[in-house]
């Protein structure tokens, strides 16, 4: 029967009926070819691909890494020299700006920022906090993704992610917050609830009559505006104030949590050239920091030709990795030279004897 199947397979190999009656056709040879294939498969005699890394390949790779990373580090350092930054001015320790531990109180005050040299646009106005740990897991995950995307009705259990700030408590929530049925804070969660709510306005004169031209263009990413923070329907509790709050640049920037306890976030983008001198910031202070011994500060920083601010740490990382790559280049080069010298002078050539042993001579003569 096996011989008949093999003959039949050879006779009709290539037809559709062969696959039905005898199995898949693997080309010329029919069932015998399949047996040979199966034998090589089980005996681990199939074709294989082995990637061999030779020292010269590693030498080339580390040399390219050294040149590339060093060049990038120089580019970052050159950009760093073009960044003009004002001093970071702390204002929570000013009596007129200190709200203590009261979250709902607002105090108005004015502080100054000094530019020691003129700057060209674009310049970014930042606010910052010290000793504020946004990176704590239970804090930065306390919000509802469905709420911020404007999904209504949201799936069951969506409010569990907002623990421990699921409701506003016995009193109605302050604006711009609202509530959803059944009594769910909108937006809920500790991270949205603790958003930075100081108001900051920049002026050129002490009378606060000549404001600096600012905008918030380019301070958010496209995927944030298009996918993450969207307005919701009015029948789901999304009032105009809630939608404006969720889609605001200040809120989106706040939700982009910081890893380190000192955080700084861009608030405005200054689109005009600024002369050297003193500028005045009108502050509506409402964010309390005294309960966790925090600090609030503001500053301005000119962007460089890379459209980025000060980032000296990036240059340090690039130079460190580039230096390690250079050490690998030197080490591999030295190893290659030592190996060649040893192969050339230390290894004696193998001597091949041409003498015929006596036993072989006696056997030949007999």
Image: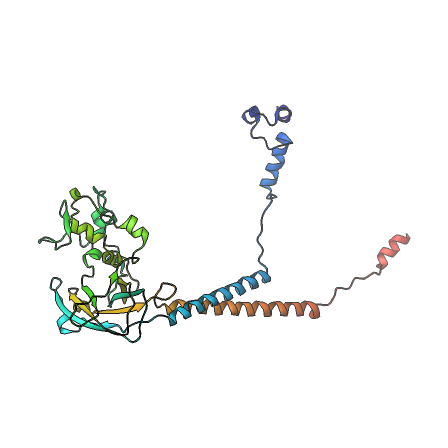
Q: Quadrant of residue 24?
A: top right
Q: How many marks?
A: 0
Horizontal arrangement in the rendering, residue 169 relative to residue 78 (left or right): left
User: Residue drawn 12% across and 67% down?
Assistant: 107
Foreground residue among 270 and 308: 270
Which percent across, then down, holds residue 210?
19, 67
User: Residue drawn 47% across and 65% down?
Assistant: 69
Horizontal arrangement in the rendering, residue 289 relative to residue 328 (left or right): left
Horizontal arrangement in the rendering, residue 97 relative to residue 41 (left or right): left
Residue situated furthest right in the rendering: 365
Foreground residue among 227 and 323: 227
Residue situated furthest bottom in the rendering: 116
On-image quarter of the N terminus: top right
Foreground residue among 259 and 206: 206
Foreground residue among 334 and 325: 325
Which percent across, then down, holds residue 147?
22, 48
């Amino acid at each position: 029967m096996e011989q008949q199947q093999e003959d039949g397979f050879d006779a009709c190999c290539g037809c559709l009926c062969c696959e039905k009656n005898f199995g898949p056709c693997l080309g010329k040879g029919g069932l015998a070819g399949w047996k040979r294939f199966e034998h090589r498969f089980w005996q681990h005699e199939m074709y294989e691909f082995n990637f061999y890394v030779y020292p010269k390949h590693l030498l080339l790779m580390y040399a390219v890494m050294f040149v590339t990373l060093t060049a990038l580090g120089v580019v970052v350092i050159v950009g760093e020299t073009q960044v003009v930054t004002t001093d970071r001015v702390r204002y929570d320790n000013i009596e007129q700006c200190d709200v203590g531990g009261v979250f709902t109180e607002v105090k108005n005050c004015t502080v100054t920022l000094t530019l020691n040299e003129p700057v060209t646009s674009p310049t970014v106005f930042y606010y910052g906090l010290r000793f504020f740990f946004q990176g704590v897991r239970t804090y930065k995950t306390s919000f509802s993704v469905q709420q911020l995307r404007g999904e209504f009705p949201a799936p069951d259990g969506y409010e569990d992610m907002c623990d421990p700030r699921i409701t506003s408590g016995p009193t109605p929530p302050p604006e711009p917050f609202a509530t959803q049925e059944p009594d769910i804070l909108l937006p809920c969660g500790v991270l949205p609830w603790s958003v930075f709510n100081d108001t900051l306005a920049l002026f050129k004169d002490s009378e606060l009559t000549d404001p600096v031209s600012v905008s918030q263009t380019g301070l958010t990413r496209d995927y944030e505006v298009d996918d993450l923070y969207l307005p919701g329907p009015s029948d789901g509790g999304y009032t105009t104030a809630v939608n404006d709050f969720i889609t605001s640049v200040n809120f989106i920037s706040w939700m982009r949590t910081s890893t380190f306890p000192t955080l700084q976030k861009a608030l405005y983008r200054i689109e005009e050239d600024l002369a050297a001198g003193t500028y005045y910031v009108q502050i509506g202070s409402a964010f309390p920091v005294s309960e966790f011994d925090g600090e609030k500060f503001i500053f301005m920083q000119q962007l460089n030709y890379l459209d980025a601010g000060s980032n000296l740490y990036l240059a340090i990382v690039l130079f460190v990795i580039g230096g390690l790559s250079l050490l690998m280049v030197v080490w591999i080069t030295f190893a290659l030279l030592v190996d060649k010298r040893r192969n050339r002078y230390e290894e004696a050539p193998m001597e091949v004897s041409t003498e015929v042993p006596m036993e072989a001579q006696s056997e030949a003569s007999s």
